[in-house]
Image: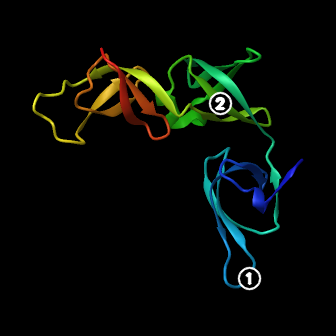
């Protein structure tokens, strides 16, 4: 099992703490006037999703987590889980809805995602940063309603509702940031 030093801390680093895998969410190196330097670090538990904050002293060692990332394609939803296929071996895996969470609303069928495994168990799904989706339904924008920053709700093909500008119509294709769930731009007209 390899170990990491405090100088290795970076966003996305996977480490073992208290018997669970964690990933680094945020970190800040601090050199106080008195005493030893340390790194204030926020860790997210990959199993429970809980976020904790710990100070890691300089020179302290951390154990690497036994995690593996696989590129997989989302095939379909089945009851309370989602079925994914490994793009290199064609093995299929069922991942519970709780593991995917809110990202399920922005996950169209056939999308290729990164699935994180811990001890052969899927613990997380990372969507591509941007997806393009067709607008299924939205209220028409009114001529003369040109206030900047005004949005209206629009339903996309995955079932999610996204706030879009007034000029977007049903049938248009839009680009969405999956990290925030926000509209970015129109990429195709109806």
Q: CA distance from mark 1 to mark 2?
A: 41 Å
- In the displayed structure, 120 sits above or below 26; it is above
- Tag shown at residue 114: 2
Determine which quarter of the picture holds residue 95: top right
Q: In the rendering, at what x and y percent does residue 55 appear?
A: 69, 68
Q: Write the residue at 78% across / 32% down.
A: 120
Q: Residues within 10 Å of mark 1 (few under 14, many from 20)?
A: few
- In the displayed structure, 168 sits above or below 16; it is above
Q: In the rendering, at what x and y percent does residue 86 appear?
A: 71, 20
Instruction: Determine whether the residue tagged by mark 2 lies in a helix, strand or loop.
Output: strand
The number of callouts visible is 2
Q: Residue furthest bottom?
A: 34
Q: Is residue 44 left or right of residue 106?
A: right
Q: In the rendering, at what x and y percent does residue 190 appear?
A: 30, 14
Instruction: Determine whether the residue tagged by mark 1 lies in a helix, strand or loop.
Output: loop
Q: Earlier in the sequence, mark 1 or mark 2?
A: 1
Q: Write the residue at 73% across / 14% down.
A: 90
Residue tagged 1: 35
Q: Write the residue at 82% across / 65% down.
A: 60
Determine which quarter of the picture holds residue 74: top right
């Amino acid at each position: 099992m390899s170990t990491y030093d405090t100088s290795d801390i970076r966003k996305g680093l996977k480490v073992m703490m208290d018997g669970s895998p964690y990933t680094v969410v945020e970190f800040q190196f601090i050199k106080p006037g008195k005493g030893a330097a340390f790194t204030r670090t926020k860790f997210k538990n990959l199993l429970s999703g809980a976020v904790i904050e710990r100070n890691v002293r300089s020179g302290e060692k951390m154990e690497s987590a036994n995690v593996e990332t696989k590129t997989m394609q989302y095939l379909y939803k089945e009851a309370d889980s989602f079925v994914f296929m490994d793009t290199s071996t064609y093995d299929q895996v069922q991942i519970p809805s709780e593991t995917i969470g809110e990202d399920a609303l922005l996950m169209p069928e056939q999308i290729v995602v990164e699935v994180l495994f811990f001890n052969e168990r899927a613990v997380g799904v990372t969507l591509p940063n941007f997806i393009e989706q067709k607008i299924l339904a939205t209220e028409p924008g009114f001529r003369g309603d040109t206030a900047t920053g005004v949005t209206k709700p629009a339903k996309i093909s995955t079932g999610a509702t996204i706030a879009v500008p007034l000029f977007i119509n049903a049938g248009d294709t839009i680009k969405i940031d999956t990290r925030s769930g926000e509209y970015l731009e129109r990429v195709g007209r109806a």
